[in-house]
Amino acid sequence: MASPSGMSSRTPLALFFVFFCCCCWFAATTSAQLSSSFYNASCPNALPIIQSAVKAAVAKERRMGASLLRLHFHDCFVQASPGCDGSVLLDDTSSFTGEKTAGPNNNSLRGFDVVDAIKSKLESACNQVVSCADILAVAARDSVVALGGPSWTVQLGGRDSTTASFSSANSDIPRPDFNLTDLISAFSNKGLATTDMVALSGAHTIGQARCTTFRARIYNDTDIDSSLAASLQSSCPSSGNDDSLAPLDASTPTAFDTCYYRNLLSNKGLLHSDQQLHGGGSTDSQVSSYAANSAKFFGDFASAMVKMGSISPLTGSSGEIRTNCRKTN
């Protein structure tokens, strides 16, 4: 017998079932999203543990701040694994060759011991809860802050990959010999705008580079300050001494500031790719703006870091939470 409204007696049950399913779908979808409060309940001391360890590491060696920031960048840019997923930390296995020995990383990436120490402390506090991918993201932020740069809200809940991509590390990470068109394309391929690229390049206000990455610039490029080139040639000969280091920002190599951009205005970029940001191209005005306005650079850098940190993360039940950042479970 029909109800007064014309609905069958089973309609309320059917509606409840649909409502229940929708709620479950919404909950699953929501739980799979990144959130700044992801560990508030499951590991409330996660962020303080990471921050304390990063502060200690940077206090011991200022350069380590740049190294930890670079680990996060090189992790996120290898999208085939798929993105910000801790793949850069994995050692080689019988089933895949990791990213550590790829061209942009080999004899270059460092800070793995610091990440290992952080992971050990987190495992003691809350076993198999905090991902290695999130350690890299938070450590990058805390490194910048420790060196005088801006802070930002890190979106958490990314999980760890179970594989890595040697080939993608070689093809996707921007090279020091890139021209402006190459740089714009490389960042665009990751969903990052040209303005993001210029802001993120400001990470080169800290850290050092190996002779092999800037040799061609100091001997062949014409858009380089002659005194800078001569100075660098004394420690970076035309052949040999590949591992000799030079600061990316010779003015204030361990302070996160705008000197990197000021250097570009004077043709004092260390890498060919650095100087490409200012030399008559489309990004000149942005470089000049940052050189004159640290607040503008800091704000844009922070926003670009949040955007980069959201490149194809693994969430929900994808991937895993490693107990050792260097190998899968």
Image (cartoon, helix red, strand yellow):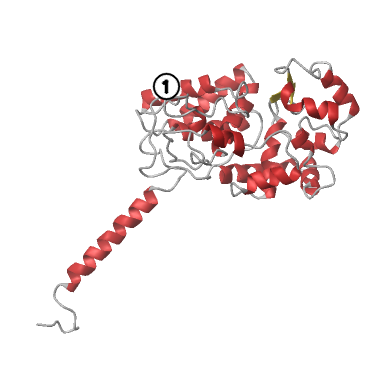
Q: What element does badge 1 sit on?
A: helix
Is residue 231 depicted above or below 205 in this figure?
above
Relative to residue 301, is residue 75 drawn left or right?
left
At x 50%, y 45%, the residue is 312
Which amino acid, by three-letter code, is at mark 1?
Ser
Instruction: Classify 10 Å Cα crowding around label 1: few (below 14), some (14-19), many (20 and above).
Output: some
Q: Quadrant of residue 149?
A: top right
At x 45%, y 31%, the residue is 132
Relative to residue 19, is residue 129 drawn left or right?
right
Where is residue 22? Give x, y as percent: 31, 61
> Can residue 299 be seen by looking at this rendering?
no
> Can residue 189 be seen by looking at this rendering?
yes
Instruction: Please give the residue where the numbered disc 1 appears in the rendered image.
Output: 120
Q: Quadrant of residue 12?
A: bottom left
Is residue 216 depicted above or below 21 in this figure?
above
Relative to residue 234, is residue 4 drawn left or right?
left
